[in-house]
């Protein structure tokens, strides 16, 4: 590429990058509204920006005292995770008054935001109703259409419950299906009852009837030990599946009105996290300048463009909420980008040391670095995928941003860096001193 054309293209790209940097950080009024920067469009999670708190107080009509508060907290946490919340706090609070024996529970989390960037407490309130829903699963069987004899009390009954989607009834009524899979013990017990004669089954979830027992059961109702239940509303079906999987909450709690709370680690958590990411990037850029001179300039521009691309990806990918685990994922992705750039620098140095000209050494260095950088990206991507599939909470937030960062990192090392090298090296005249290259000693 000719020097004049390289200068023009590099200047244009740098102007675009400078504009993106300004739009990322700067806030300014636009008419009657305020532009809050690209960073303002990234949705933050509870541990970064605070959220909403609810107090759960044991209802006065409970017939039992809470025997195991840890089990209650575990059930509530399971339900929150099942509803898609990654970072939240569930704590048991004890009144200082010695006359009060029961615990209150405080749940802090962040709701989805609406088009105005505000928390949608309507959706959050509906989710809290599901989380705090009361009721244990019980089964009744017999030869009557309304069985009252409790059965299946000697072991675990349900293996899994899944929301099965929309089903049309024979009278064109829309129902929502919940498929429950019985354990071997429960299935064998039910089959024994069916084989003994006409058998009716009634399933109760707390005070809610999931299956009325109005129809006699036959073996044909079961597919792979699963039985379909039909609920009149989608939210009711999802709530039933969630409650069945999480186990019963045998105590009734009253949910308070929502209260706004700040981030648990302080109101400047997001700012400190941003500074940490920038500090890591700046340290790597300085190190590249010291070690590789002109290649440090190429690496610096690459890392800046990589961070800009990663920031835009956090906005473009739906459902991403940035948590502290996500910030750690961004930092690790930045390290991954720097590692790829170092691999390429080493390959270029090896090529030049073996006798190649600067331009050839650069081209061969980038070509030889593809496979090792790709290998690191594949391994890192698999780690992110496994964490996303099997982890929960903050680790899942880490997996999301790290997974996105792995993709951006590979593109940066193989495309952005090569683009900047192709523009900058013609301007520098492909001089070995610019890249701090040395021949091997004879």
Image (cartoon, rainbow, N blue to C red):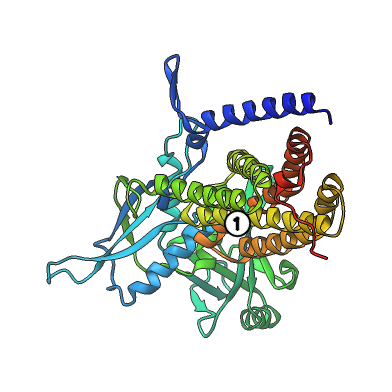
- Residue depicted at 76% across the width and 34% down the height: 423
Q: Is residue 100 left or right of residue 331?
A: left
Where's the N terminus, which quadrant?
top right
Where's the C terminus, which quadrant?
bottom right
Q: In front here: 243 or 186?
A: 243
159 is higher (above) or lower (below) than 381? below
State the image coordinates of residue 373 (x, y, percent, origin top left).
Answer: 75, 58
State the image coordinates of residue 191 (x, y, percent, origin top left).
Answer: 68, 79
Instruction: State the SS at label 1.
Output: helix
Q: In this view, does 128 lie to the left or right of 282?
A: left
Please tell me in which quadrant of the rendered image residue 87 appears.
bottom left
Evaluate whether residue 431 shows in this view. Answer: yes
Q: Callout 1 environment at 10 Å: few (<14), some (14 to 19), or many (20+)?
A: some
Q: Kindly give the residue lying farthest to the top in the view shown.
A: 31
State the image coordinates of residue 279 (x, y, percent, origin top left).
Answer: 48, 49
434 is higher (above) or lower (below) than 222? above
Q: Is residue 368 left or right of residue 324?
A: right
Residue to which mark 1 is pinned = 335
């Amino acid at each position: 590429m000719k020097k004049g054309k390289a200068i023009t293209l590099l200047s244009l790209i740098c102007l675009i990058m400078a504009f993106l940097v300004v739009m990322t950080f700067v806030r300014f009024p636009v008419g009657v509204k305020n532009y809050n920067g690209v960073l303002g469009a990234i949705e933050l999670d509870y541990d970064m920006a605070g959220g909403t708190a609810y107090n759960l107080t044991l209802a006065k009509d409970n017939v039992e005292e809470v025997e195991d508060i840890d089990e209650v907290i575990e059930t509530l946490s399971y339900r929150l995770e099942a509803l898609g919340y990654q970072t939240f706090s569930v704590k048991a609070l004890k009144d200082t008054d010695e006359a009060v024996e029961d615990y209150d529970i405080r749940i802090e989390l962040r709701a989805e935001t609406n088009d105005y960037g505000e928390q949608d407490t309507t959706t959050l309130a509906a989710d809290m109703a599901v989380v705090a829903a009361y009721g244990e699963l019980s089964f009744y069987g017999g030869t009557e259409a309304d069985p009252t004899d409790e059965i299946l009390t000697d072991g675990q009954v349900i293996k899994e419950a899944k929301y099965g989607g929309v089903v049309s009834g024979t009278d064109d009524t829309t129902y929502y299906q919940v498929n429950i899979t019985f354990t071997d013990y429960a299935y064998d017990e039910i089959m024994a009852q069916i084989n003994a004669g006409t058998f009716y089954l009634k399933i109760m979830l707390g005070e809610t009837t999931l299956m009325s027992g109005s129809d006699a059961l036959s073996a044909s109702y079961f597919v792979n030990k699963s039985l379909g239940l039909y609920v009149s509303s989608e939210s009711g079906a999802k709530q039933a599946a969630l409650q069945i999987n999480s186990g019963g909450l045998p105590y009734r709690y009253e949910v308070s009105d929502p209260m706004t709370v700040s981030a648990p680690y302080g109101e400047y958590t997001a700012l400190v996290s941003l500074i940490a990411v920038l500090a890591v990037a700046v340290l790597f850029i300085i190190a590249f300048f010291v070690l590789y001179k002109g290649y440090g300039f190429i690496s610096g521009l690459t890392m800046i463009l990589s961070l800009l691309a990663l920031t835009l990806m956090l906005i473009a990918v739906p459902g991403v909420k940035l948590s502290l685990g996500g910030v750690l994922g961004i930092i690790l992705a930045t390290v991954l980008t720097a590692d790829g750039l170092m691999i390429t620098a080493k390959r270029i140095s090896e090529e030049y040391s073996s006798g190649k000209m600067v331009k050839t050494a650069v081209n061969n260095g980038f070509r030889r670095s593809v496979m090792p950088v790709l290998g690191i990206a594949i391994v890192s991507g698999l780690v992110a995928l496994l964490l996303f599939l099997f982890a929960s909470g903050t680790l899942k937030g880490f997996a999301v941003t790290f997974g996105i960062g792995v993709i951006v990192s590979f593109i940066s090392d193989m495309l952005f860096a090569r683009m900047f090298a192709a523009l900058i090296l013609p301007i520098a005249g492909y001089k070995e001193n610019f890249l701090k290259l040395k021949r091997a000693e004879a």
